[in-house]
Every structure is written in structure tokens, then in C-alpha cells.
Amino acid sequence: MVHTKTNIKPTNDRIGWRFDNSYARLPKSFYVQLLPVPVRAPWIAVLNHALAESLGLDLRSLSEEEAAQLFAGNVLPDSAHPIAQAYAGHQFGNFTMLGDGRAILLGEHLTPAGERFDIQLKGSGQTPFSRRGDGRAALAPMLREYIISEAMHAFNIPTTRSLAVVTTGESIMRETMLPGAILTRVAASHIRVGTFEYIAGTGDEEGIKTLADYVIQRHYPDLSSAENPYLALLNTVIERQASLVAKWSLVGFIHGVMNTDNMTISGETIDYGPCAFMDAYDPHTVFSSIDHHGRYSYRNQPHMAQWNLARFAETLLPLLHPVQEQAVVLAEEAIHAFPHIHQTHWLDGMRKKLGLFTEETEDIQLIEALLTLMREHQADYTNSFRALASETLPTTAVFHDAAFIAWHAHWQARLSRQSESRQSSFCLMQQHNPAIIPRNHRVEEALAAATEHGDYSPMQRLLAALTNPYADVPEYDDYRTPPAPSERVYQTFCGT
Ligand code: AMP
Ligand code: MG
């Protein structure tokens, strides 16, 4: 197929692309320039019009056919500058050189408000980093990323977002033949801890400085005037990740593959593979089929974030201080602060979940006692918190336990010790305890309808419910029901 940039100019520029590809101006060792591999028969599975509008893109001016060609990478926006980025990763603790093995960064789009977003096609064909992979992606995992990332956005959790999923009209070989698809991912940037590890791994000290300066300029411009901008960068990324992982815990989200290549410098959640939300509360929960030792279980997420950040800190050592021993001291100090920073964010979020505006030192015991009860009763995490934010408690077993009744009295007394009204507490709780999460069994159901029967209505309905997850919408009450034993999903797959 002819694949040039000249045949597309009239089609795509009218939708409002404004690309400025600053990453492609960085040293050539950071990436490889190449085009997406065209696909046979692209077809739009889902388009995110709300996101497009917020980016200043007018997708409605494209025909379905034109949109499909665009989001398949068969035609390119005039000012795109497609590259595959190089990066490395500690995957389950082991260091590997990686890179965009199945993704192409089209470029950075500038919104009318002046914000800069990476526009990336995932599943767009082989690259020099593909190793043994085919560079492609299957439909179900791409739809899954679309659903979960949009839900995370609705929870106000920093995340990459999904602009489109197209099917390719080609089958890909996994354990069985599956329909191929491409996801268009929108991110503050795709710079990862693994990007720094890659450059450090090549021994390029100047490159690390170039990348750190670029990140500061792109994401954290205020830091350039700090006394030690690189230490300030480390501290800021630690802060962002501590806040992020706390937010995950607060909604019961388990990422599943917290490898260093899946941790962004911007603090956005990235790479939705075997991720899932917990139904019954159990801190040991693991869903990912490849996580045999529970490395990335719910309760381990903060530890793993800290471990990844230590890898980030190592790459920055030459920049932190000219004397290596001093640099190590500074890095260690920063990394050791992580648990406390994380705990502060988590506690802050938990207080909101319980309607607390003020701080008392015993709050931690109050929270832990509730979580212990929930664990003992295998109570549904989401519904238990949401129930506390309602007028009357449901008949669920946990709420009849004498220990819970005693806990409830403590909580009521605690609420009375703050000046805010009960009504204000309920409002706060309603805003921090979602009514609807993308429960695994409902996600799987939506994906099965789409991929096996071409029926996208269950997915569209789920997406509609998830746009407003903190509201009580009777029409969507069915999404609040936890899975019956026969519906429980115990394992999720990366879907690479
Ligand atoms: P992930 O587990 O999705 O973070 O992927 C780890 C690495 O494998 C990344 O560098 C991906 O680009 C690469 N990868 C995943 N799936 C494929 C595929 N089908 N073909 C080529 N590379 C892939
Ligand atoms: Mg990844």
C-alpha cells in the first residue's frame, strides 16, 4: 500500500491537529523514526468525542471511513513526525532494554489552551524494538484499556486517555487467532522511569542531563529555578507517584504490571494490561496471570512504586551531586521519604471516604479497624464505603457484626467532634466513594459482546455509566452488584 504523508493533507488538517514534535528534536539515540505499518480494513470500534473536543479536534467533520484510516495510521496528519521511543524496564525485577515494540508516537498535539499531549498509536506494527513480537494488539485488550482509562479519568485519577479504538480487519496470532486493533493513546508524555534507565544503560551521562532538562521544561518548568533542579525533579516525581498509588488504593485499583517501563514521569497511570478493580476487600488480591508471587498485589503497590523510584533515582545520581557519595545520600533521603508521603495521601483520601474534615491521630486506627472488618467479612470494598455514605445501612453481613456496630458508634462520635454538618460529611463521602466501578465481570461481559458478536452496546452502556461514577443513577444500579460466585474473575491477562 502506498504510504506517504502527501496523500492525507486535506483529510486530517481540517480537524485541527497542531503538532509540535519536541521529543523528535532530542538526540537520535532516544528514538527511531518510522511510520506505522498500514492495516487492511480499518473500522471504528469506538471514538471518544468528549476527549476529542477537549483536545480541540473536530472528529465530527470526518466520515467514519476517514476517521478509521486516521486512527489506524493508514493516513497521517500533515505535521506528524512518527517515532518509536527507546526505553528500558525492570520487568518483575529484571532489567531489559525495550522500546515501543508495538506503538508509534505520531507527535505532540497542542490544544487550543496550549496544553501538549502525546498522540500515540498502540498496535501499529513492528518496530526495531519489537523483539519477537508482531507489533500488533488484539481488540479485547485495547477495548479494556479504553474502558479502564476512561473510568480512571472519571475518578479524577491522573491517567493516559483513549481517543479511539479501530479494528484492523486483520487477525493476529495469540493462543488463538484474534481480531487485531489499534488504540490511540493520549498522554501528558510517554516518558517513563524506563526512559531514564535506557539512557543510563547506554552510559550516556550527557543524555541523562538532556532528558532530565527536557522533562523539567516539559512537565515541571517551575523546577528549573530550584537550587538543585534534579533533586527537585526526583522529589516531584516521588510526590506524584505517591499521590497516584494512594489514589489507586482508595478506589481498589490494582495495576498488575508495575514494571519501571510502566511508570510515567508525569505521574499518569499508564499501560492498562491485566489491571482490575477489587470486589471483595482483600489486600493480597492479585489478578494478573503472570504475577505468580504477588509482586504487584494490591497491598504491595506502594512498595513497588518506591522500588521503581529508587531505579529512577539511580539514573539521576550523576546530576544530583558531583561527589558520588553525596549524590547517594541525597537520593536515599528522597526515596526513604516515600512511605510517609504515600501514607499522608492515603490517609487524606481515607478521611474523605469517611466524611472527616479534620485530623485526629487515632483516625488511622479507625480506618484500619473498618478495613479489618471488611476483610473478615469479604465485604465488597466499593459498596461498603458507598453504603456508609447513605441514609440507611444495607442488610449485608458486615453491618450486623457486633464489632461493626461498635465501630459505627466510634465513627459517629468522631463525626460529632468536627464542626461540619452531617450533610457536609455525606456530600464529601459521596464525592470520594464511587457508586460504580468497572467491575471485572461487567468489563469481560462488554468485551465478549463486542469481540464475539460485534455488539458494542454493552460497552457503550458501561462507558456511559462510568462517565459519572459518583452519582446515584437508578438506571445503572445493576453495575453495583458484585459478581455472583460463578461470575467471579480471578485472573486477568496482559493481552500482548
Ligand atoms: P507491556 O507488558 O505492555 O508493558 O510491554 C512490554 C514491552 O513489550 C513493551 O516494550 C512493548 O512495546 C512490547 N510489546 C508488547 N506486546 C508486543 C507485541 N505484540 N509486539 C511487539 N512488542 C510488544
Ligand atoms: Mg508497557
Image (tube, rainbow, N blue to C red):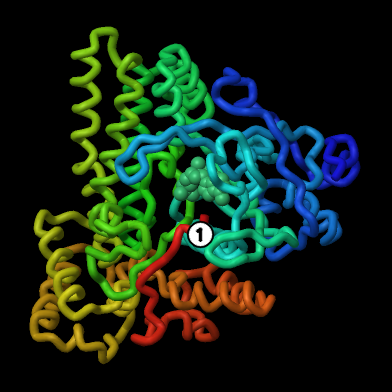
Q: Please tell me which residue is depicted at 35% across the width and 65% down the height of the picture.
A: 287
Q: Disc 1 marks which residue?
A: 495
Q: Number of marks in the image?
A: 1
Q: Indicate the position of residue 459 as horizontal and vertical percent values.
A: 60, 73
Q: Please tell me which residue is depicted at 40% across the width and 16% down the height of the picture.
A: 203
Classify residue 360 by image quadrant: bottom left
Quarter the N terminus occupies: top right
Q: Residue most toward the bottom? A: 395
Badge 1: residue crowd in 10 Å (few <14, some 14–19, many ≥20): some
Say above or below: 438 vs 309.
below
Classify residue 14 by image quadrant: top right
- Tell me if 247 is positioned left or right of 420 in this view: right
Camera-nearest residue between 245 and 409: 245
Instruction: Give the residue type at disc 1.
Output: Gly
Q: Indicate the position of residue 323 as horizontal and vertical percent values.
A: 24, 8
Residue 188: tell me if it is visible: no
Camera-nearest residue between 263 and 222: 263
Say above or below: 308 vs 66.
above
Residue 50: tell me if it is visible: yes
Q: Please tell me which residue is depicted at 51% across the width and 80% down the height of the picture.
A: 473
Q: Please tell me which residue is depicted at 59% across the width and 63% down the height of the picture.
A: 143
Say above or below: 411 vs 335.
below
- Tell me if 364 is positioned left or right of 77 in this view: left
Q: Secondary structure at mark 1?
A: loop
Asked whether mark 1 lies closer than 8 Å to ligand 1, one says no
Classify residue 174 by image quadrant: bottom right
Q: Indicate the position of residue 229 as horizontal and vertical percent values.
A: 38, 19
Camera-nearest residue between 354 and 7: 7
Q: Indicate the position of residue 384 as horizontal and vertical percent values.
A: 28, 77
